[in-house]
Amino acid sequence: MDEKVLELKQIIEGSDNIVFFGGAGVSTESNIPDFRSVDGLYNIKYKYSPEVILSHTFYKEHQEEFYEFYRDKMIFPDAKPNKAHLALAKLEEIGKLKAVVTQNIDGLHQLAGSKNVFELHGSIFRNYCEECGKFYDLKAITESEGVPKCSCGGTIKPDVVLYEEGLDHKLLANAIKAIMAADVLIIGGTSLAVYPAAGLLDYFKGSKVVLINKDETSKDGKADLVIHDSIGEVLSQIIE
Ligand code: CNA
């Protein structure tokens, strides 16, 4: 076993109060593209960048185009949890991991069996009518065309936090609470470029920060252990 992975194993063995903070890189091994990797969404040619299309302003002004991109690039109903999701669920099951704080909207942590998941940016599986508030599941988006409409005539909007929109206050407070109470923070599969989510890491007061990411991040210098590798490969070795 690689020296760094061994060190991670020892850190995990020594703690029963771990929190995981992750992003799109956790799901690339489930074939869901992230934003910033070389084969991520930023490197596919679009008329607009994902950040523009997934903004509140764009959603309001170009709904047809928004839903075209959203259905095509943000929804992967057949995606399955990968080794990273499964390892994290296992760590929770054996009492070591207390929470997963994720920027992902794909629901794969829950599908893997994780229970205490804070979805900072919402979920593709929840959708609401903007007029009457009626709840809709994912089929309302996948099985409709153009702008999805409620039976009342209102537009159905995914419960996903778009750029320019604020995070849910209660959820944010609970995620911060979990991070503040943790002894070990494992950060993985995130460029740490999206705020306020990335700012949550500043609340950590515990003993060890581990960063597992393919590319360098702005927080590499602050971590006790940095592993530049695939998160599924790394975490699956911990759980063997
Ligand atoms: P990002 O900015 O795309 O960064 C992803 C990071 O993960 C990069 O630094 C990569 O190097 C790294 N990475 C990619 N694959 C792996 C891997 N297998 N192992 C280790 N590291 C890897 O994504 P962030 O999450 O930081 O950005 C935040 C946005 C992206 C959030 O608002 C998400 O909602 C949004 N997003 C989510 C999904 C999803 O739900 N699966 C998909 C695409 C984008």
Image (spheres, helix red, strand yellow):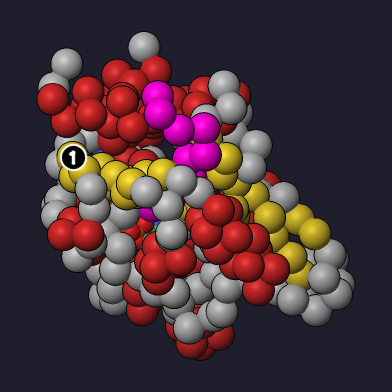
Pick out the residue farthest to the top.
240
Instruction: Assign the N terminus to one quadrant of the image.
Output: top left
Near mark 1 (Cα within 10 A), the count class, few <14, some 14-19 or many ≥20, is many
- Taking depth in this image into account, of 13 and 51 the one nearest to the observer is 13
Query: Dot 1 corresponds to which residue?
Result: 227
Tell me where the magenta segment starts and ends, as one range.
Answer: 13-23
User: Is residue 103 at all visible to an observer of this figure?
Assistant: yes
Q: Residue placed at 22% from the left, 23% from the top? A: 6
Q: Is residue 93 positioned above or below 121 on the image? A: above
Q: Is residue 172 left or right of residue 2?
A: right
Q: Is residue 154 positioned above or below 80 on the image? A: below
Helix, strand or loop at disc 1? strand
Q: Is residue 210 positioned above or below 144 on the image? A: above
On whether residue 22 falls in the magenta region, the answer is yes
The x and y percentages for residue 81 are 47, 30
The x and y percentages for residue 85 are 45, 32
Q: Is residue 98 positioned above or below 205 on the image? A: above
